[in-house]
Image (cartoon, rainbow, N blue to C red):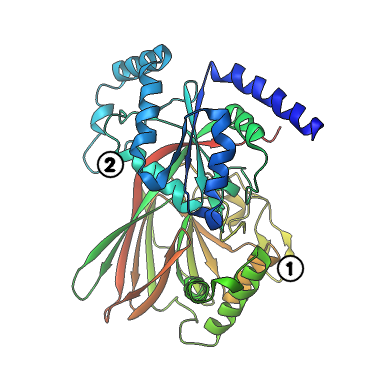
Amino acid sequence: FERRRKLELCAEREIGMAEEEAAVVLFVNRKSGGLRGEKVYAEFEPLLKGRCFFMNDGPEKGLDECMRILNESKAYREKLEEFERRHAEARGGGERGEAQTEFFSTEEVLRVICAGGDGTVSWILSAMDAYEPLPKCARIPVAHLPLGTGNDFARATGWGGGYDGGRAAQVIQHVLRSRAQRLDRWKLLLKTQSNGETKALFFQNYCSFGADAAAAYGFHTAREQNPHLFTSRTKNKFYYMREGTKVTFSKNGGPIHKTMAVHATARGVQFTPTLGARTQSLLILNVPSYMGGADLWGQRGETLRGQPFLRSAPGGGGGVNARPEGFKPQSIGDGLLEGVHMQGLAHTGGALVLRYTGRRAWQADTIHIDGTRPRWFAQVDGEPFVIEDPKGFSADIVLSSVACVLVKNTR
């Protein structure tokens, strides 16, 4: 206990020194992780002293505190004035219909910790986008303290798969030492073909169509009906594979290459990627983590056909739309999405348990999808749903906005 307290006091002294340069504000989802948000709030409040806020009470109070900190900072005001001089039209968001991709980060003045699941991160980033006092050209960098189930965003940015408490001072130190990076946020516009109804969804991790989404839908439904059975990540993987087996032997599985067409654009070049005859799921990725840590694109290379424990070269040459060994490295802020094909639920299960990758297909910045089946399963950032229409659906995916996030330094 004495040794741990000495480490805490040392950490507090370092935090106090760093706070002269950057303040830290905590946003907590009270309901995340079986109400663990309450414990996180109690743990961080003595260190952050009035700068902890529950998202469930509305984000405005916390954002007002963020804005107060910024407005009192001479460095922030000077940076804003300099940016506006150089980008006279930045506050208007550029041309109509385009996402504003130029911004400056407040990392030297203010950093935010978001404690919750992937949905909580999306919540706070959307709230920042809609908060009028914050200039459109300014981005407050956000670190994800993972309290949810999958925590794919936290895994992708180096903050791990879950926070169990007891390390508040160390977390704050890591936040102050982390690096800011651009994050692309995407809009999925769904349209049913019979009546033309449209629905806009937003994501920053991934979206998918086909058998994997059907398994996720079954898993989600079973967990809502019997939450007491889903008490660990290991059990969750078992139940997911069970749902995958059900899908494999039902009409919700099977190849999709005859009932789905994809059209894409990459850096102004249009192309029509083909779906392989064995493809049962199309996944569109923005981060290198899927359903709790699976790296489907393959940062260390794609697993080889027939030899799943061997990998191809990681890539990096050849540019966009090249062969697998020539694709660009995956990034959360390069304006590109990665298209991956999964060949059935056994393939997906291998990715979750044995760390196989998917089949790399393409990289693109705008995507159009047509599906002709009357019933499709889809998911957006781990939230599955059903698309039902006699004539099928169409979907358009475009860049919606850009945010600033904090990536943990591993050194």
For disc 2, the marked residue is 98
Q: Is residue 267 visible?
A: no
At label 1, the amino acid type is Gln
Q: Nearer the viewer, residue 154 or 399?
A: 154
Q: Is residue 75 above or below residue 5?
A: above
For disc 1, the marked residue is 307
Q: Nearer the viewer, residue 359 or 285?
A: 285
Which corner quadrant of the image does residue 150 belong to?
Answer: bottom right
Q: Earlier in the sequence, mark 2 or mark 1?
A: 2
212 left or right of 366? right
Which corner quadrant of the image does residue 172 belong to?
Answer: top right
Q: Nearer the viewer, residue 236 or 355?
A: 236
Label 2 CA crowd tier, 10 Å (few <14, some 14–19, many 20+): few
Identity of the residue drawn at 58% across and 32% down? 175
Q: Is residue 195 visible?
A: yes
Percent coordinates x, y for residue 375 in the rendering = 36, 79
Q: Is residue 223 above or below residue 404?
A: below
89 left or right of 107? left
Percent coordinates x, y for residue 81 in the rendering = 32, 15
Q: Nearer the viewer, residue 137 or 140?
A: 140
- Quadrant assignment for the N terminus: top right
Identity of the residue drawn at 60% across and 74% down? 229
Label 1 CA crowd tier, 10 Å (few <14, some 14–19, many 20+): few
Percent coordinates x, y for residue 386 in the rendering = 37, 73
Which residue is the extreme one toward the left?
195
At label 2, the amino acid type is Glu
What element does badge 2 sit on?
A: loop
- Quadrant assignment for the C terminus: top right
